[in-house]
Amino acid sequence: MANNSSSRQGQLFDDYSNPDINLYFASHDDVEELCKVINWAYRGKPSASSPEESYSGWIGEQHLLKGARITSEELRQLIDDEQHTVVLVAKLKTPSGSKIVGCWKISTYDKNLQMTEEEKQDVAVEFGLNAVDPDYQSRGIGTLLYNGAVRIAKEYFNAQRVYSCIIRSKRNQIEWCLRQ
């Protein structure tokens, strides 16, 4: 479980790794914009020139799965589960404020799913819901979020292990994770 009992929603987590992007703990104020970014990354973002067409980055799954990746209500529930889940949000500084460009979910991992007795003694987390707006992919935002997620795994959950579930056919995503 996370070692911080007071609400951290909306608090700044990291403002020094990238001068243009800050990492925050997600809050309810982020839900609508964040839900769009997640669904764009996984299911495709409408093209500005042709709204009936969509495009996605390298984690797109619209050819495999239909429907929303996450709903606003599901995202609110994750944000509210502060003892077991952290949703980290990347916000790009803009002249008018900030814009959400990505996220990463860190949650406690069920000890019963771990294979050995030794693993069951360790604290483990699962990384998921890693998403970057397709317009901002390949700019280091995913790596920034990953590094923040590793810090949260260690500092908030005292984790010794990290798990992630990736669809087998998503070789590029698996290879990226293995390089980190």
Image (cartoon, helix red, strand yellow):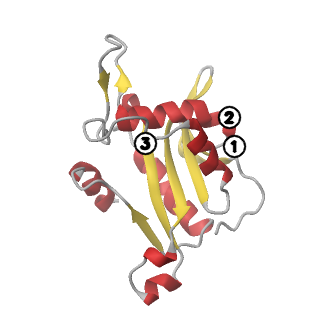
Q: Which residue bears the numbered disc 1?
A: 10
Which label sits on residue 126? none
SS state under label 2: helix
Q: Which residue is outermost to the top?
A: 49
Give the amino acid at mark 1: Gly
Marks 3 and 1, Cα distance to the nearest angstrom? 18 Å
Residue 97, percent across and down? Answer: 64, 25
Q: Which mark is residue 29?
A: 2
| Residue farthest right in this picture | 6
Residue 127 visible to an observer of this rendering: yes
Q: Are marks 1 and 2 in contact (CB under 8 Å)?
A: yes
Gap in angstroms between the C-alphas marked 2 and 3: 18 Å
Quadrant, the C terminus: bottom left
Farthest bottom residue in view: 117
Query: Which of pointers 2 and 3 lies earlier in the amino acid sequence?
Result: 2
Tag 3 residue = 131
The image shows residue 89 at horizontal and vertical percentages of: 56, 43
Pointers 2 and 3 in contact (C-beta within 8 Å)? no
Q: What element carries label 3?
A: strand
Q: Looking at the figure, which quarter contains the N terminus?
A: bottom right
Indicate the amino acid at tag 2.
Asp
For disc 2, the neighbor class at 10 Å (few under 14, some 14 to 19, many from 20) is few
- Viewer can see residue 133: no
In percent of the image, x 67 and y 57: which residue is there? 82
Q: How far apart are marks 1 and 2 (CA)?
A: 8 Å
Q: In this view, does 162 lie above or below 88?
A: below
- How many C-alpha atoms fall within 10 Å of the one at disc 1: few (<14), some, or many (≥20)? some
Name the amino acid type tagged 3.
Ala
Mark 1 vs 2, N-terminal side: 1
Q: Quick one: 15 or 180, which is closer to the camera?
A: 180
**Residue in the picture at 54% in, 61% down:** 107
